[in-house]
Image (cartoon, rainbow, N blue to C red):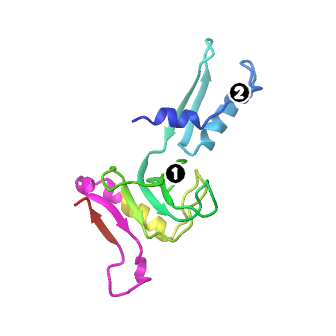
Amino acid sequence: EGWRPRILSAIEMPKSAQWRDADLLAEVARRMEATGWVAQVRQVTKEMNGVVRVDCDYRRPIAMIYTRQGLSNSSWSEGFIPIDADGVRLPEEYGSVGSEAGWIRIFGVRTAPPPVGRSYDRQTDAEAAVRLARLIFQQPFAVQISAIDMANYRGRRDRNQEHIVLRTRR
């Protein structure tokens, strides 16, 4: 799916790393976990030819949350951040994500995004949207859903209107 270059670009080996350094494998594991792409490092090994192999459980994005705050390029930005099924914020940011992109887009979330590699707090509009996206993602009709609108979550705008709106690709 083209994620390998993205993950590898997030890892930079220390310039002082030595092949025989006893802490090399632990440092690689720490850096992998710090990328935000990795849920768990299972094993890190080094081979005689200098190749370091890492066995990991990777995080996969299931949705993109639209936000107007917390993006890295400035104190006030807007764009989409990818999240996995556990609500963990993944490293990348996108200025726009179209309805045909294949991702469920989530709009109307007021909760500030967590740092990369961390999940949204429980009992928030963001966490509710992630749970709904996870349920939709498992359904055969998931390809028909383009967005979840959380702007009226728990009736915060109008108790007489729908609290959550699903938008289809058509």
Q: Quadrant of the C terminus?
A: bottom left
Q: Amino acid at mark 1?
A: Glu
Residue drawn at (44%, 45%), measured in percent from left and top? 60
Residue closer to the observer: 42 or 13: 13
Measured in 3D between alpha carbons, the distance from the residue under mark 1 to the one under mark 2, in whole angstroms, is: 30 Å
Which residues lie in the magenta part? 135-164
Kindly identify the residue that appears in the image at 64 percent across and 62 percent down: 75
* Mark in the foreground, 1 or 2: 1
| Quadrant location of the N terminus in the rendered image | top left
Q: Is residue 37 above or below residue 79?
A: above
Q: Is residue 142 above or below residue 109?
A: above
Residue 18 image offset from top left, x and y in percent: 74, 21
Q: Which residue is mark 1?
A: 93
* Residue at disc 2, secondary structure: helix
Count of numbered labels shown in the rendering: 2
Q: Relative to 143, is 157 on the left or the right?
A: right
Image-quadrant location for residue 145: bottom left
Which residue is under mark 2? 24
Element type where label 1 sits in the image:
loop
Looking at the image, is 153 positioned above or below residue 133?
below
Camera-side residue: 75 or 92? 75
Rendered location of residue 14, percent (x, y): 72, 30
Q: Amino acid at mark 2?
A: Leu
Could you tell whether 156 is left or right of 21 in the image? left
Can you say whether 91 is above or below 167 in the image? above
User: Can you tell which quarter of the image residue 27 is in?
Assistant: top right
Q: Could you tell me residue 166's position as x and y percent?
A: 30, 67
Mark 2 closeness class: few <14, some 14–19, many ≥20 residues within 10 Å: many
Q: Is residue 134 left or right of residue 58?
A: left
